[in-house]
Image: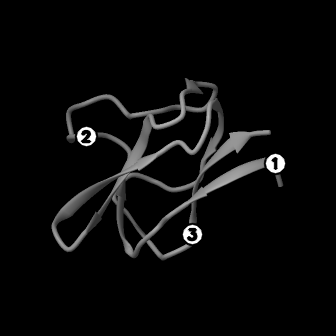
Amino acid sequence: AKAGEEVKSPMVGTAYLRPSPEAQVFVQVGDKVKKGQTLLIVEAMKTMNPIQSPRDGVVAEVVVGDAQPVEFGEPLVLLEA
């Protein structure tokens, strides 16, 4: 397992790695992110909820796949320590 901070899903829903099917992904492994930057979206009950980075960091791993169902508390993205 990699060391770092897990960004977890705050809800049950479907994770989307891009804002629309033809768009680029929000983040990729190795990207530097700023606190508050959108990492992905979790759709719950037809509402798109942006999941934001809790701090500045580097994306170590994107744990979920695009359009993958996620559970509450499930790791979505790993930020390097």
Disc 1 is placed on an element classified as: loop
| Residue with the mark numbered 2 | 19
Looking at the image, residue 30 lies above or below residue 52: above
Q: Position of residue 29 (x, y in %)?
A: 60, 32
Looking at the image, residue 57 lies above or below residue 12: above
Q: Position of residue 15 (x, y in %)?
A: 38, 58
Q: Which mark is residue 2?
A: 1
- Of residues 75 and 22, the one nearer the viewer is 75
Q: Name the residue rendered at 51%, 56% in the picture.
A: 64
| Sequence-first disc among 3 and 1 | 1
- Quadrant holding the C terminus: top right
Q: Residues within 10 Å of mark 1 (few under 14, many from 20)?
A: few
Q: Position of residue 25 (x, y in %)?
A: 38, 34
Q: Position of residue 37 (x, y in %)?
A: 44, 34
- Quadrant holding the N terminus: bottom right
Q: Which mark is residue 62?
A: none
Q: CA distance from mark 3 to mark 1?
A: 16 Å
Q: As shown in the figure, which amino acid type bears the numbered disc 2?
A: Pro
Q: Residues within 10 Å of mark 2 (few under 14, many from 20)?
A: some
Disc 2 is placed on an element classified as: loop
Q: Quadrant of residue 45?
A: bottom left
Q: Name the residue rendered at 56%, 72% in the picture.
A: 73
| Sequence-first disc among 2 and 3 | 2
Q: Answer left or right for 8 relative to 43.
A: right
| Sequence-first disc among 2 and 1 | 1
The reply to whether discs 2 and 3 touch (Cβ–Cβ < 8 Å) is no
Q: As shown in the figure, which amino acid type bears the numbered disc 3?
A: Glu
Q: As shown in the figure, which amino acid type bears the numbered disc 1?
A: Lys
Q: CA distance from mark 2 to mark 1?
A: 27 Å
Looking at the image, residue 25 lies above or below residue 32: below
Q: Answer left or right for 18 relative to 81.
A: left
| Residue with the mark numbered 3 | 74
